[in-house]
Image (spheres, grey):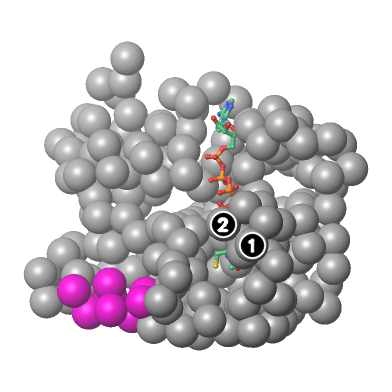
Amino acid sequence: MTVFIGITGGIATGKSTVSHMLKELGYPVVDADLLVREVQRPGEEVYRQIVEKFGGEILLKTGDHRKKLGDIVFTNPEKRRLLNAIVHPAVRRRMREEKERALKEREKALFLDIPLLFESGLFSEVDKVMVVYADEKTQLERLMKRNNLTKEEAYFRIRSQMPIEEKRKRADRVIDNRGPLENTKKQLLEILAEWGISREGPEEARGKKES
Ligand SMILES: CC(C)(COP(=O)(O)OP(=O)(O)OC[C@H]1O[C@@H](n2cnc3c(N)ncnc32)[C@H](O)[C@@H]1O)[C@@H](O)C(=O)NCCC(=O)NCCS
Ligand SMILES: Nc1ncnc2c1ncn2[C@@H]1O[C@H](COP(=O)(O)OP(=O)(O)OP(=O)(O)O)[C@@H](O)[C@H]1O
């Protein structure tokens, strides 16, 4: 049986960073943000519905709706709910396909990186949840820097999600990603060992061969 593990956290707390570490270790990881992009491609039903509900001008401006759509949904909760209602069922379907594939291929574990795991009820799709944590101040700084956003823009994005402190409480395990990346990797290896899914020898799993 494959164990399905959800990776979540707040925006810019480090989910992709941890996913990258897992991929380097050879684990399969499904990225919900990529699935979102897939189902939003022209020709897809989700794309058609977005144009219908949000207007064709979203597409006409740049030939790509993402930036404009982001500006709308991160500042307007009603529009955000509308977009989520269009996109999330399709993402859930794609996720189930990925889970089926992992089961068929007898993978020991499949990681699913899902930013809105709790908000969108997708936690029912996974057996365990790992929350990648950074306090809100760190989150804000990293988000402003990575996306080149003003403080206000970054706050709007953070406030569009469940508070990170709340997510932390709901986790099976928390990875504290406030410190250097070696610390993050060490915690990750410890959790993998604890959950019996290490791909390394016991020494490496305890983070002793780092550097
Ligand atoms: C709003 C959109 C157009 C912004 O696109 P953009 O390329 O700028 O960002 P990207 O998709 O890479 O997402 C970046 C991060 O924003 C956060 N985020 C994205 N959508 C949402 C949302 N609806 N509510 C809260 N946070 C969100 C997540 O932490 C995500 O990791 C896009 O994210 C989207 O269509 N979102 C709706 C689908 C969704 O809920 N995605 C989250 C994964 S299930
Ligand atoms: N331990 C760390 N120390 C310093 N910077 C970090 C650390 N972890 C991640 N970062 C940086 O913080 C930013 C956010 O990290 P990352 O992209 O992994 O977050 P995320 O949770 O996947 O974000 P999103 O929700 O937007 O997908 C990136 O620019 C990343 O390089």
List x then y, in percent, for residue 207.
Answer: 33, 29
Q: Are marks 1 and 2 in contact (CB under 8 Å)?
A: yes
Query: Is residue 173 left or right of 99 when viewed as pictured?
Result: right
- How busy is the neighbourhood of tag 1: few (under 14 within 10 Å), some, or many (20 plus)? few
Residue at position x 41%, y 76% from top? 43
**Gap between marks 1 and 2 measured at Cα:** 5 Å
Q: Is residue 104 above or below residue 62?
A: below
* Amino acid type for the residue under numbered disc 1: Leu
List x then y, in percent, for residue 16.
Answer: 47, 44
Q: Looking at the image, which residue sits at the far left?
A: 105
* Amino acid type for the residue under numbered disc 2: Gly
What SS does tag 2 mark? loop
What SS does tag 1 mark? helix
Q: Quadrant of residue 72?
A: bottom right
Q: What residue is pinned by disc 2? A: 63
Span shown in magenta: 94-101
Q: What residue is pinned by disc 1? A: 60
Query: Is residue 122 left or right of 158 when viewed as pictured?
Result: left
Q: Is residue 12 above or below residue 66?
A: above
Q: Is residue 191 above or below residue 21?
A: below
- The chief SS type of the magenta part is helix
- Determine if residue 148 is in view: yes
Residue at position x 32%, y 44% from top? 22
Residue at position x 19%, y 70% from top? 102
